Image: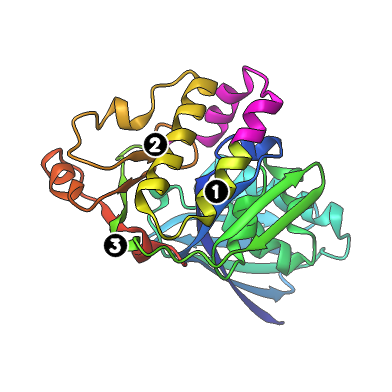
Amino acid sequence: MAVRNYYTKGKLLISGAYGVLDGAVGFALPTKLGQRFCFETDRSNIIQCKAVDDKGNTWFEAEFDVKSLAPLKTSSEDVANTFSKLLIAARSLNPDFNYSFTLETTLEFDREWGLGSSSTLIAALAQFASVNAYELLDSGFKGSGYDIACATAEGPIRFQRIGKEVSVNPLNWRPTFTDELHLVYLNQKMNSREAIIHYRKAQSSDYFLNELSRLSIAISEETSDINRFEKLLLEQENLLANRLDITAIGDQLFSDRPDGVFISLGAWGGDFALFTRKKNIPYLEDKGYSTILKLQELCIY
């Protein structure tokens, strides 16, 4: 019997949303909150899994047959089937990954926040099973992999994936205006798969991908002028709004804001929005938004 522990971080995609799926450059920050994993091998011929949320409540339990990797019993069939597919994919990548074990996971962030409960799992399971995390992602989910990169990143990254080629560049991004950067939780969970389906209804042009990359690079390099930073964010937001045919969040929910800009992060329509200018905090509280964080409070940079 052996015990192996892993810790993987959550993520926020600041720029490059959607286009990062098609080879555009993305700018992302790992979060200070992540997920802890404790794997313990045994000889039970059963794989047991228990997942605990940030409040200490067990939100998922399951047992799997070690040979077929099929669920034997579970508290959630959907979650169990997803985990079973990941186990099967891991074994196909590494046939020596054929032993029984127990797994206990502990989340540090609210599951509704969309910070990466799945990507943190994939990154940890890949390490435990001795397989490539991006190949495991491709076998079980659809995504660019920027969240997988964030799971083990030490700080801000620029990410690009074209086909199987993955480029992850660590950045020294320390804006002088960090006190003016905040996050607000929009009180609604966005289904990433549905968002991707909507994005896929139209084909991305080279112009769109090139412009998105240009803006990601510029945003990730801007550290001294908040006015220019805001201008770049709005330029990206308008580019995405036209591509997705969706009203930008700043116009949709915060058109009467006193100052600054609001932009969607990741899949549009839910999870967190980034906003500039701390004078917007009382305005948001008056609107009933209760989860408001400093960007540096949640993210590593």
Q: Is residue 145 above or below residue 43?
A: above
The residue beneath circle 2 is 270
**Going 62% across and 28% down the picture, which residue do you hit?**
208
Which kind of residue does numbered mark 1 sit on?
Ala
**Going 76% across and 52% down the picture, which residue do you hit?**
166
Q: Position of residue 20 (x, y in %)?
A: 64, 40
The residue beneath circle 3 is 179
The residue beneath circle 1 is 218
Which kind of residue does numbered mark 2 sit on?
Gly
Q: Is residue 127 left or right of residue 150?
A: right
Mark 1 burial class by Cα count in 10 Å: few <14, some 14-19, many 20+: some
| Observer-nearest of 73 and 103 | 103
Bounds of the magenta segment: 190-211
Give the secondary structure at mark 2. Answer: loop
Mark 3 vs 2: CB contact within 8 A:
no
- The answer to whether residue 49 shows anywhere in this view is yes
**Going 70% across and 74% down the picture, which residue do you hit?**
41
Residue 206 is covered by the magenta coloring: yes
Which kind of residue does numbered mark 3 sit on?
Asp
Where residue 125 sits, quadrant-wise, is bottom right
